Amino acid sequence: MSEQSTGHAATAVADGPPSGDMVVVEDLRRTYGSGDTAVHALRGVSFTVPRGELVALKGRSGSGKTTILNLVGGLDSPDGGRITLDGTDLAGLGDDDLLAMRRDRIGFVFQSFGLIPILTAAENVGVPMRLRKVPPREREERVQLLLALVGLADHAAQRPGELSGGQQQRVAIARALANRPVLIIADEPTGQLDADTGLAVMELLRAVVRSEGVTALVATHDAQLLALADRVLELRDGRIVSDT
């Protein structure tokens, strides 16, 4: 069932200068295992993601897309190379600073939605702000704004099990925006959705990038969805083979 993307935020929430690169990746390398069984997930990958753009990563399973997302998101560490996010070199951050970076500056959207089943849509969106101890009134106002942004203002009291797959992913996008991130990282965000719903969710993500002034790095294999990106990086065997 197709779902239409709706809404724009009233104000932009981007931090920092409006131009330049949000993400700078230089000669990134990552190997899992050692010896004859070593898997070279990334072999010297370099690219930039300009502020305010939606850049897509495409490639077959095992090409290195998820590894890049995990490294840029601070969920894993590279064996070599450098990642600069919003002017900060991730290699210079300790565990606490990386945690704060992920909590305050990055919004994550996963294929599996990752919502908490016992919480309502509104409560799920509010979780990141609770972790930051945002005052209740401010938190509630932002939850209402974000649910309206993703077209779910009338579904605030429903739990994930009462929502369609497309609606759940919309809640996940709203949650990713809760703490006003500068970067959204999405790993196959439409992987569990039918074609029409997936396209609607991707169109919403693109609209969010525009209206909220954020940057997005999205892994997807769907050619129809790739057409909505500002740029597409194709990976093969841990290397970028095209940049269009």
Image (cartoon, helix red, strand yellow):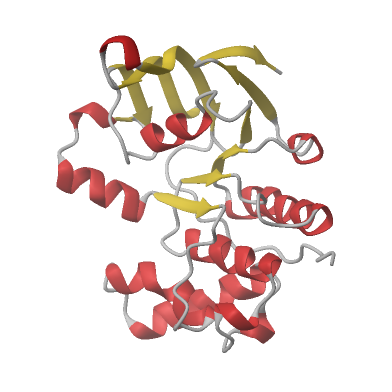
Q: In this rendering, is residue 138 above or below 47?
A: below
Residue 40's x, y, as percent?
Answer: 40, 16
Residue 104 picture quarter: bottom left
> In the rendered image, which quarter contains the N terminus?
bottom right
Front residue of this view, candidates 225 and 244: 225
Residue 42's x, y, as percent?
Answer: 43, 18
Q: Residue furthest bottom?
A: 157
Asked whether, in this view, residue 56 is left or right of residue 21, the answer is right
The residue depicted at 67 percent of the width and 26 percent of the height is: 232
Asked whether, in this view, residue 74 is left or right of residue 141, the answer is left
Front residue of this view, candidates 95 and 212: 95
Q: In this rendering, is residue 26 above or below 225?
A: above
> In the rendered image, which quarter contains the C terminus?
top right
The residue depicted at 28 percent of the width and 69 percent of the height is: 131
Front residue of this view, candidates 40 and 49: 40
Residue 67's x, y, as percent?
Answer: 43, 31
Q: Looking at the image, how many numbered discs can be counted on the residues?
A: 0
Front residue of this view, candidates 227 and 138: 227
Q: In this rendering, is residue 192 above or below 152?
A: above
The residue depicted at 59 percent of the width and 37 percent of the height is: 219
- Residue 86 seen in render: no
- Residue 2 seen in render: yes
Residue 127's x, y, as percent?
Answer: 38, 72
The residue depicted at 49 percent of the width and 16 percent of the height is: 238
Q: In this rendering, is residue 189 above or below 167?
A: above
